Amino acid sequence: MPADLVREPLDCALTATQALLALRGDDRPFALMGAWAGGGAVLGSAPVRVAGPEDDLFARLDDLPQVAPPAAAGAAGAEDGFGGGWVGFLGFGLRHAVEPGHPSPPRPVSLPGGVLAYYDHVLRRDAAGRWWFEALVTAEREAAVARRRAVLAARLARAPAARAFATRGWEWTPSPAAHARAVQACRARIAAGDLYQANLCLRLEGRLAGDAIDLFAAAAEALPTERAAFLAGPWGALASLSPELFLARRGRVARSAPIKGTRPAGRRAELAASAKDRAENVMIVDLVRNDLGRVCRAGSVRVAALADVRAMAGVWHLVSEVEGELADGVGDADLVRAAFPPGSVTGAPKLAALDVIAELESTGREAYTGAIGFASPLAGLELSVAIRTFEIRDDRIWLGAGGGIVADSDGAGEAREAAAKAAPLLAAIGARSPAAPGAAAAPNDAGEGDDGDCVAGRDSTIGALWGPWTPKCTDRAAGAWRRLGPRPVARPDPDAGLYETLLVRDGVPQRLGAHLARLSHSFRVLYGRRPPDDLAERIAAAAATAAARDATARLRLDLTPGGDLAIATGPIAPAGGPVRLRPVVLPGGLGPHKWADRTLLEAHEADDPATIPLLVDADGHVLEASRASVVVRAADGALHTPPADGRILPGVTAAHTGARPRHITLADLDAAAGVYVASALRGLSPAARTPAG
């Protein structure tokens, strides 16, 4: 339906952040501040449409009204207005809608895959500091928009007050030391020829007391940046201080400005002289040229700036610019699909880099490293790269940080770079970067010892586990990480469904309620539906049939995402002798679900069939065995098991033993009075771990 542009001046002397505070309590408020839409700020709330969970968010970017000529004599031309449009974010996970790839690591706190809302009116502060009420008005909305203008003008006539907020409990996940080792693992992938560069990230997590809108207002005032953005809704909030342009389209010209290379303030000359950072930048420029070349007119893509040193948001960056003219028939949806996710936060080749990211990072990305911005029938398309972004849900708050890894990257240096990126953001909200935990020491700056052997630091065990991934390392712990194949082995595929294994004794399935509760919870979380209503009855019937053959039996049920159920029973195989646990590093673990897809675990099991893989995280904390939970008996007789913190399957049998949750290290296993694996079929079985090297 055609819409008229209405653009009326407002008598307002507020700053952009003050004006945003005037929208407190409204439905889905947003603010875009800095260079957006020609400079200034665009603010809004109370959208008229919200994209649904089943919508194709990329396609929504093209779902815009035709705009009629200016509605009033003397009004600005359409090319000078914003009026309204879709505003929101496209989460990193939408990469699977572009090109399916390896599943992500567990997500400690999840946000929607993306959020878009259509606003038919906004507040706009132009580059000269003047405020405007702008709207794309249809006949049906004319009266409502007029009332809305009056409400907003009245609010802007008085300065709203900011409210106090505070954050606490910030922790790195994983530690900077573990991130340094992940960098070494990535270098091994590069040395094997799998890829040229990958962007690896870690996360800072904390707690927020107060309103996200106040946090963003304080941060944006303290640390102005070109692509500051605030989004909030029932799903949570984003407070972004990104300096990086992902994509912009005005008319038929598309532009991207990737950032690669960072130094803290005061170290400009060092960045300008860095051959490594320049090479990293050039690689991503080539990738962006390729992305734009897929949708631009042949021969029109060019590099407008290459590795310029620019000051942004408390640090120095190397910034390049690539632009091209879109081919006939190409819309915003096609453009974004061709380039998503942004090349500067993935790597090259992009698909190989995405698989390495899924393999080596400890937490799944949410909005972080996706895109934030707008699609407007007047102002075109603008999206930032969602970096330097606080993500908030309830009282949980987190911040991603990382950088591009190339063949000569230094693990400790990359960890320092990530901390340098996070430090000014934390300072802007009155927080401090936490000290790194001491569970595992970082390698030295060279990434290996003088003799070419791996440096384990203070904790030689976890250092040895990571060691074989370093190109110059010896094979003294060759079994700790699965040998490099042509590509990383994928984490479990959720589309394969879930399963449960139960012990049947005298025809009665043991601890059926606990098993069904675990399965039902996973099914609702993953697939948004309930398991079959007659699930318990079908299990009971299968168990009764099994009793005619065996006094004790094994029952396995498999449940597909569509709700199809298969149940099989059979005898319990005899124990194969003492359980020997072989430590294997799996950043982030497998998550809290019992996956039917065991490809990754079977690959680890095949490395040494005489042992059972013992999964540990990147910092050396014990998670679970490949087929059982882990329980340790302390010297005082107390039982402990790793906490069900979203990285492991909550153990039904372990819980039945009364074991208390506690973080457990490999050193704790060595010192324990007893180590056990807990499974539904065998209960507690004594176990011991094999040496790491």
Image (cartoon, helix red, strand yellow):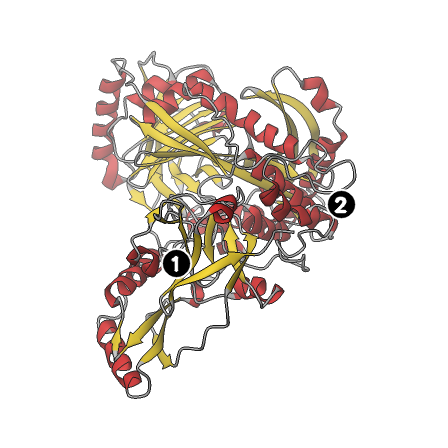
Residue 162 image position (x, y, % from top left): 29, 17
Identify residue type, mark 2: Lys
Q: Upstream in the sequence, badge 1 or badge 2? A: 2
User: In this orientation, which residue lies closer to the viewer: 625 or 482?
Assistant: 625
User: In this orientation, which residue lies closer to the viewer: 237 or 276?
Assistant: 276
Which disc, if any, is residue 472?
2
Residue 397 image position (x, y, % from top left): 38, 33
Secondary structure beneath label 2: loop
Q: Does residue 517 sit above or below 145 in this rendering?
A: below
Residue at x 74% of width, y 35% of height: 279
Q: Does residue 158 sit above or below 441 in this rendering?
A: above
Q: List the residue tagged with mark 1.
A: 593
Which of the 4 image quarters holds residue 652? bottom left
Secondary structure beneath label 1: loop
Residue 167 image position (x, y, % from top left): 36, 25
Residue 221 visible in the picture = yes
Q: How packed is label 1: few (under 14 Cα within 10 Å), some, or many (20 or more)? A: many
Identify residue type, mark 1: His
Which of the 4 image quarters holds residue 537? bottom left
Q: Residue furthest top?
A: 13
Residue 195 visible in the picture = no
| Left or right for 630, reference 441 | left
User: In this orientation, which residue lies closer to the viewer: 98 or 482?
Assistant: 482
Which of the 4 image quarters holds residue 15? top left
Q: Does residue 400 sit above or below 360 in this rendering?
A: above
Residue at x 30% of width, y 75% of height: 504
- The span from disc 1 to disc 2 (Cα, nearest Å) is 37 Å
